[in-house]
Image: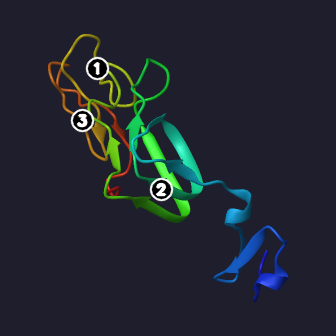
Amino acid sequence: MDCAADTDCPASQSCTLGACVSSCIDSKDFVVPADETRFLSGAWSFCNVIINGTLEVEPYNGSSGGILELGASEKIWIGATGSVLADGIGYQSGDGPGAGNCEGSSSGGGYGGPGGAGCCDGIASATYGDSADT
């Protein structure tokens, strides 16, 4: 919906760059208090993300976990006592979009570019993701 001011939009939206967009009214904050640990994986969007404790990415279990895509419409704030732990996170060997082409070989997928061929008859694994992601 096009707009010139917030009054042109439904109550739960605001006018941003000429378009009505959802505001934080409908969204929730994600807060990790100091001295606490929260576990999360998958894709999430919040109004605000405030981390004063530890946010740990849930490990991949063969069907879910291993990644965290965290978004905020207002702010993501990691305090002096806050941390995000993603040690050893990702897909297990032979799993996920970077699994490679050959069963039991050393080929590997490539995020944003061709993967390694390993000992798979010189065939590189499929590309996944976007080379422009940083």
Q: Please report the residue visible at 60 percent of the width from the left and 54 percent of the height from the top.
A: 29
Dot 2 or dot 3, earlier in sequence: 2
Give the mark nearest the N terminus, 1 or 3: 1
Instruction: Determine whether, in the image, residue 64 is placed left or right of residue 100.
Output: right
The local secondary structure at tag 3 comes to loop
**Nearer to us: label 1 or label 2:** 2
Q: Position of residue 133 (x, y in %)?
A: 35, 55
Few, some or many C-alpha atoms within 10 Å of disc 3 (few <14, some 14-19, many ≥20)?
many
Which residue matches tag 2? 50
**Identity, as a three-letter code, of the amino acid under mark 3:** Gly
Q: Residue at the spot x=26%, y=40% of the render?
A: 114
Amino acid residing under circle 2: Ile
Residue displayed at 35% across by 45% down = 84
Quadrant of image for the N terminus:
bottom right
Amino acid identity at mark 1: Ser
Q: Nearer the viewer, mark 2 or mark 3?
A: 2
Nearer to me, 125 or 2:
2
Kindly report the distance in space between the C-alpha atoms of the residues bearing marks 1 and 3: 14 Å
Label 2 Cα crowd, 10 Å radius (few <14 / some 14-19 / many 20+): some
The numbered dot on residue 22 is none
Above or below: residue 74 compared with residue 89: below
For residue 4, which quarter of the picture? bottom right
Tell me if 5 is positioned left or right of 61 in this view. Answer: right
The location of residue 80, given as percent across then percent down, is 31, 58
Q: Secondary structure at mark 2?
A: strand
The residue that disc 3 covers is 115
Residue, disc 1 = 93
Q: Residue furthest front?
A: 35
- In the image, residue 101 sits, relative to residue 56, either above or below, namely above
Marks 2 and 3, how far apart at CA: 36 Å
Q: How many marks?
A: 3
